[in-house]
Image (spheres, rainbow, N blue to C red):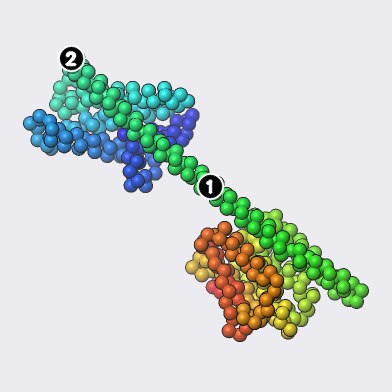
Amino acid sequence: MITATPSPKRCDTARERGHPLELIPLFRRWPPSLLRNLVYTAIWSSAIALLLTVLQKLFGRTSMSFARLLFATLVISNLIGFLIHGALHLLERHFPRENMLLFRSAQVLAIAAASVIGIPFGNALVAGRSPLRFYQTSTTLVFLLAFGLMTAVLMVLVLSAGERRMRREAEAARQQEQFAAAGRLVAEARLRALQAQIEPHFLYNTLANVVSLIDSQPAKARRMLERFIDYLRASLSASRAEHATLGSEADLAGAYLDVLGVRMEGRLRWRFELDAAMRALPVAPMLLQPLVENAIMHGIEPKLEGGEIVVRAGLNDDVLCVEVCDSGHGLRMAPPRPGGGVGLSNLRERLRQLYGTGAQLQLIENPTGGVTARLLLPLLVPSSTIPTP
């Protein structure tokens, strides 16, 4: 019939108990508040009054009209309901819950007392008679006590059912949080695994190239080693960051391309079409690097004359669209390579872990040759000043 205000000693008490009407899903939509609890108490008490009026007209011996009987029952039922509301409110604020049996007993006594007081005073309001006459005969007093105890037991059972539902929902919410945290940990582990797959062979190949160039082309070896140091610095920063921006991802990819550019010389060209607004957008780390590496490995490097890589991004209906376009062999002409597709498979799995079904990775054959890897990520940012790709 009621919900009490949270106790200072236990701030979640009222929410844990809730209101009896919350057993009905429709009434859970209104967040708990003092106004809501008062309105719900009036609805609950009025519904009980209507039920009692119908039962009295069907099975009782009363000559009162339905409307008059309903009015009287509404007054008495709401008076009892709000007395119970106040009594339980005081209990929640001042009575400890450490001993649940004692607390339930106190609830029973409080509800029974509210009923024993409410019936006589409700009748006094309706009929204009003194409420003391209900306490003058033992028969009436026994009836009041029996009715009060029955009401109290039923109410405590309803309140207990509501509390159990609240605890189940709280436990389900905690489990959901744990699942989400586990999903983030899995995504982080996959990120580390992805970095572990990207870096070793790139590290070995680069160092091998530096060694081979030291004697014959020392200036080129020095330039490659400097670019490689820049890449390692950017990669280390990315690996330690929990969050990234599109700009930091572009810097990492740019350092990677700088190293390859020294080795491939004129066979590799690249450019980034990203303005300042796009560079500031938040993204998960290590999403752009696999796309760039895939474009090099399967598109540009196998092609004798090489080609160009273009990285661009834009927002379309609050979806961040990142494209890595290459002018390489394309999907049909690219020769198979050992381990091919592992990086993109890992990337798709990371997208599923991070964004669920809200992100996509698309591979599109370019009409003029090469492939466009398109990454679609959900992103809620103002789109009025950001271009569409």
Above or below for 285 versus 12: below
Residue 81 pos. (x, y %): 28, 31
* Disc number lying in front (1 or 2): 1
Q: Residue at x 54, y 49 (%)?
A: 179
Which residue is the site of mark 1? 177
The reply, left or right, for residue 257 in relation to residue 125 is: right
Q: Which quadrant holds the C terminus?
A: bottom right
Which residue is the site of mark 2? 137
Above or below for 199 versus 136: below
Q: Amino acid at mark 1?
A: Glu
Helix, strand or loop at mark 1: helix
Asked if residue 71 shows in the view, the reply is no
Helix, strand or loop at mark 2: loop
Above or below for 257 versus 117: below
Residue 39 pos. (x, y %): 30, 39
Between marks 1 and 2, how big is the CA–CA gap?
59 Å
